[in-house]
């Protein structure tokens, strides 16, 4: 099944197939979103019990997808973009102040989004497996959207980028928020399905269906590479 007919929500059932994207050298960029140490490191389960052990096991499918599918896909796309001389950019969550006063409200609320990641701490860094090289741009955000909390929109515009290929985590949160912001700013967005993950496969699949066709074209890495200049 082609990306042109996959991942369709209720709204797009029976809609015409989208046109092939026209990706031009100098106008397409890869954006890697929030792949950071804090989301990939795991404690030794032998040291856990009760809720913490249950929580560890609940997150195992996410880590399996990250290490078995998402990171290899991102590594492949980094190689493809770099090898073709196309721009690669990164976005990460991190606060500038150690006490996190500069974070957006969404990152101060109790629960999952209560993130305190000072910018120079190990937890906020991009792992070696997908680290930036050379002059590749990294924007640091205190919001979910990589556009809202940074000068990324201006950077992309100055670079002449019209098409942004998005990968990273979490599909239903920072990836989705960034994709929606990019679309609202009239960038043409492609989400690489096998280059993203959510906390659960169900959440990933649901969000991919929600953003497809209106905010982005969703395709797999093989399909995307076929369009790269």
Image (spheres, rainbow, N blue to C red):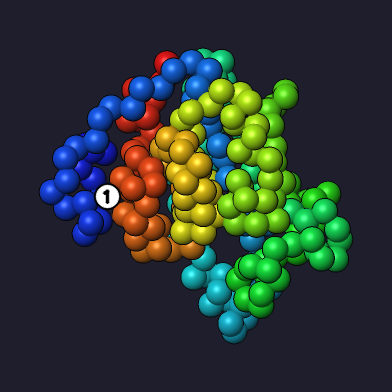
Label 1 packing within 10 angstroms: few (<14), some (14-19), many (20+): many
Disc 1 target residue: 7
Q: Position of residue 194 (x, y in %)?
A: 40, 43
- Is residue 14 rendered to the left or right of residue 114? left
Q: Position of residue 43 (x, y in %)?
A: 67, 64
**Farthest bottom residue?**
50
- Is residue 168 rendered to the left or right of residue 106? left
The quadrant in which residue 83 appears is: top right
**Farthest right residue?**
98
In the image, residue 99 sits, relative to residue 37, either above or below, namely below
Q: Position of residue 4 (x, y in %)?
A: 23, 38
**Farthest front residue?**
185
In the image, residue 200 sits, relative to residue 50, either above or below, namely above
Which residue lies at the image location 51% right of the left edge and 70% below the top edge?
Answer: 57
Which residue lies at the image location 64% right of the left edge and 34% below the top edge?
Answer: 154
The quadrant in which residue 41 appears is: bottom right
Q: Position of residue 22 (x, y in %)?
A: 36, 22
Which residue lies at the image location 63% right of the left edge and 26% below the top edge?
Answer: 158
Q: Is residue 70 visible?
A: no
**Farthest left residue?**
14
Which residue lies at the image location 64% right of the left edge and 67% below the top edge?
Answer: 106
Q: Is residue 174 visible?
A: yes
In the image, residue 122 sits, relative to residue 72, either above or below, namely below
User: Which sits in the foreground, 161 or 219?
Assistant: 161
Assign a secondary structure to mark 1: loop
Q: Which image quarter is the N terminus in?
A: top left
């Amino acid at each position: 099944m082609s990306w042109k007919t996959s991942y369709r929500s209720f709204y797009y059932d029976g809609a015409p197939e989208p046109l092939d994207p026209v990706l031009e050298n100098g106008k397409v960029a890869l954006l890697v979103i929030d792949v950071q140490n804090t989301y990939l490191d795991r404690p030794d389960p032998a040291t856990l019990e009760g809720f913490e052990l249950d929580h560890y096991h609940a997150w195992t499918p996410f880590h399996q997808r990250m290490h078995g599918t998402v990171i290899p896909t991102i590594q492949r796309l980094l190689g493809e973009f770099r090898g073709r001389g196309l721009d690669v950019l990164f976005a990460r969550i991190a606060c500038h102040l150690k006490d996190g006063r500069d974070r957006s409200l969404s990152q101060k609320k109790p629960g999952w989004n209560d993130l305190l990641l000072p910018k120079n701490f190990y937890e906020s860094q991009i792992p070696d497996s997908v680290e930036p090289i050379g002059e590749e741009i990294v924007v640091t955000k205190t919001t979910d959207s990589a556009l809202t909390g940074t000068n990324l929109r201006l950077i992309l515009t100055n670079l002449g980028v019209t098409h942004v290929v998005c990968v990273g985590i979490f599909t239903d949160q920072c990836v989705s928020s960034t994709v929606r912001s990019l679309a609202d700013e009239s960038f043409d967005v492609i989400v690489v399905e096998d280059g993203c993950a959510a906390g659960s496969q169900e959440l990933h699949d649901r969000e991919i269906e929600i953003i497809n066709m209106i905010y982005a074209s969703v395709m797999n890495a093989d399909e995307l590479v076929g369009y790269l200049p």
